[in-house]
Image: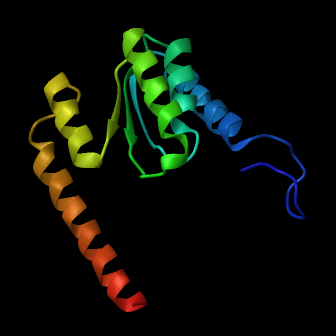
Amino acid sequence: DYGIDESKFLISTHGQHKRNEIENILKVYPKLKFILIGDSGQEDTFIYYNIAKDYPDRILAIYIRDAKVLENMAKINATIAQAHAEGLEMLLVPDSFVAAQHAVRMGYIHPGSLAEIEEQMEQERKIDSEMGDILD
């Protein structure tokens, strides 16, 4: 996280920093293909779309969790439509389980992982609910 304040002196955007880190991983593992997972709350849709355009043979899919931020939804939907038109696999999903179901259909992950993912999501929902009760 670069920026200017009393603890930082380098200038870079969050998006550029994220892109640089992903490109570093792509360079370190030149023979691997990747799935990018982000959310619609900030710039992930646009960063990941541009990475997939620049590295189309390396990015299998992009899953963008819908963070219910209406501010950029028209631009996000347009970017996803453009990705599809270019043959890039990019989906806006409500949660990790839907992304995992798609990944199973595409052969990216083993079907046996769905139960574990669903269980993990249920644990997270329980923790969120308990935290909500504490904060109320």
Q: How many labels does the image show?
A: 0
Query: Which residue is painted at 42% across and 52% down in the image?
Result: 68
Query: Which residue is painted at 9% across and 42% down in the image?
Result: 112
Return the residue nearer the eye: 56 or 84.
84
Q: Can residue 114 be seen in this view?
A: yes
Q: Is residue 32 visible?
A: no
Q: Position of residue 7 (x, y in %)?
A: 86, 63
Return the residue nearer the eye: 82 or 53.
82
Residue 108's place in the image compared with 86, above or below, is below
Q: In this view, does 2 lie to the left or right of 22?
A: right
Query: Which residue is painted at 62% across and 38% down in the image?
Result: 18
Tell me how the rendering is colored.
Answer: rainbow
Query: Which residue is painted at 29% across and 78% down in the image?
Result: 129
Q: Is residue 5 left or right of residue 44?
A: right
Q: Position of residue 27 (x, y in %)?
A: 57, 21
Q: In this view, does 80 lie to the left or right of 110?
A: right
Residue 106's place in the image compared with 120, above or below, is above
Return the residue nearer the eye: 54 or 82.
82
User: Which quadrant would the C terminus be assigned to in this image?
Assistant: bottom left
Q: Position of residue 13 (x, y in %)?
A: 75, 41
Residue 52's place in the image compared with 125, above or below, is above
Q: Position of residue 47 (x, y in %)?
A: 57, 30
**Residue 119 occupies quadrant:** bottom left
**Residue 131 occupies quadrant:** bottom left
